[in-house]
Amino acid sequence: RPSGDGVTVIVPMYLPNEQFVFRETVEWIMHNVEWLGALTLFLVYNTPEDMAEVEDQLRQMQRIDWPANRYLRVERVHGSTSKAANLNFAIRRIETPYLVVYDADHHPERGSLLQLLETLLREDVDCVQGSWYMRDLGETQGGLLARIIDAEFLADWYFAKEMSRMFMGNGYFSGSNGLWKTASLAGETFNEKAMTEDFDMSVRLIMQNKRIAFCPTARSGELAPISWSACFNQRFRWATGWDESFLQHYRSFAMQPGVKLRSRCGLFWLFGVKYVLTMISLFSLIVCLPLTIYWYSTHDIVGQPMNLMGAMPTYLGCVTWVLATLEAICQIPARGKQGLIQVPVVILVASPLGYCCLFLLMVALQVKSWARLCAGHEATWEVTQRSPLAARSSPRGPVSERRAAQQLLCANPFVVEVALVPQLKATALVAADQDASTQWSESSRPPSELSEDREQLPDAVAAEAEEN
C-alpha cells in the first residue's frame, strides 16, 4: 500500500481518443519518472460506448509486476462526459498527501516531479505548475505545427507566465503537469460544465487566497494536435473557457470579502485589461498605424513623438525575442539535435513578425469567442485529436485508418491487442520494436506468441501488414 509520503498520478482519459497513446504513457511514468516514496498511477477514463478489448487490456495492466513502490489503478467513470468529471471521481478516492495530473499523451522528464515537489515545499504553496514542450518535433506529421507550438510554449512558459505571476502574486493550474497538495482540493470540485475546468478551479482557489506557483524547469512533453484545424479548435476552446470564467467570476473580483488586493488587481489584469489591450492594439493596427505613417512623413513636431511611442513596444518585444532565443540555445544540450533545429524556429516565432501573426490569431479567436457568447450559443467541449507517433501522416500524405493500424503493428513499443475503429471491425496486434522491448521487457511477449497472434489476424489485414 502507498506510504504517507506517496503521490498519486492522475491520468484522465477519453478512451476513444487516447486508446493508442495511454500504454506508452503508463510505461514511461512507471519506469522513468523519479519519486522518493510510493507512486500510484490512477487511470480514470470515460467512453460513450463499451470498448471491450481496450478495457480488458487496461485491467490486465493492473496485474503487471511494476517496479517497487509503483502501483497502477484503473477505474471507468460511468456517466462522465468530461475531463472534470474524471478528475472529481479520482480526487475523492485519493489517500496520498500529494497528487499530480498529467494528460494521457504527456511524458514528464525524469526529475520533473521532484522539481515540482521541491518548489511546492520551498515556497509553501498549494500547487506548482510545470511547463510543456512538444515531444514529437522529429516526426513527419508533427513537423512545422509542432515546432511553432513548441517555440510559442517556450516564450509563454518562461516569460509571459512568469510576468503574470510576478504581477498577480500567483500562477494558475494549466490542466497537466501540475502538483497539488491533496488537502488544498478538499471540498473542491472541478466544474464539469466549464470549457477550461483547470483555469476555473485556479480562479476559485486564488479568490480563497490559496497560492499557485510556476516551475518552468519541471518540463513535460506532449504530442501536438493532429492537424492545424485541431489546433485552432483547441485554442478556441481555451479562449472561450477564459471568457466564461471571467463572466462567471468578475463580480467576485471586486465584491468577495477577504481577497488580497494584489490578487484582485492581478485577476482584473489577467482578464479585463487583456480585453482592453486587445481592442486598443487592434484599433492601433487598423487606424493609428496609417495615421502614424502619414504624420511621421508630413509633420516634424507630431511625427517624432509618435515614432518614439511606436518604437518603444518594438524595443521591449526585442528583449523577449533575445531572451527566448538564449533560452532555446541553453536547451540544446538537453534536447540534442531537435533543440538545435528548434533555435531558428524560436527566432522566427518570438520575433516581432511572429508576435504579430500570433496576435492576429488571438484576435480571431477572441472575436469568435465573443460572438458565440453574445449570441447565447452554448459552447461544446471538443476533444483535441492526437495520435501515437506511429500513426502520424507519412511524407506522401495523411494515412488512412487502416494504414495507421498497420503502422501500429510494426512501430509501437509494446505488444497488446487494441480495438480499432468501428469500420475495421478487426483486432490489430501492436508489435514491439527491438530497441523498446529491452526497456519494457516486463510487458513484452516471446516471438513465438507474437507469430501465433499474427496468424490469427484477418487474412486481408495480415497480408497487407506483411507487404508493408
Image (tube, grey):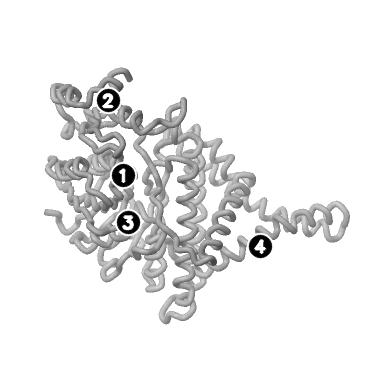
Most foreground residue, 464 or 201: 464
Question: Residue 399 in the image: x percent, y percent?
Answer: 40, 30
Q: Tag 4 or tag 1, which sits nearer the N-term?
A: 1
Query: Closer to the observer: label 3 or label 4?
Result: 3
Q: CA distance from mark 1 to mark 3?
A: 12 Å
Location of residue 133 with respect to 101 vertically, above or below: above
Instruction: Tell me the CA gap for discs 3 and 4.
Output: 35 Å
Q: CA distance from mark 2 to mark 4?
A: 58 Å
Q: Earlier in the sequence, mark 3 or mark 4?
A: 3
The residue that mark 4 highlights is 280
The residue carrying mark 1 is: 18
For the residue marked with disc 4, what is the amino acid? Ile
Query: Residue sitting at 17 percent across and 46 percent down?
Result: 70
Give the numbered dot on residue 461: 2
Q: Nearer the viewer, mark 1 or mark 4?
A: 1
Element class at badge 4: helix
Question: 124 or 277: nearer the eye?
Answer: 277
Q: Earlier in the sequence, mark 2 or mark 3?
A: 3
Q: Amino acid at mark 2?
A: Val
Q: How much space separates mark 2 and mark 3, taking CA atoms?
A: 34 Å
Q: Residues within 10 Å of mark 4 (few under 14, many from 20)?
A: few
Residue at image location 43% in from the left, 80% down from the top: 256
* Sequence-first disc among 1 and 2: 1
Of circles 2 and 4, which is in front? 2
Q: Which class describes the residues within 10 Å of circle 1: few (<14), some (14-19), or many (20+)?
A: some
Q: Is residue 84 above or below residue 204?
A: above
Image quarter in which the C terminus is found: top left
- The residue singled out by tag 3 in the image is 83
Residue 82: x and y, percent? 33, 57
Report the residue at 30% width, 40% height from top: 21
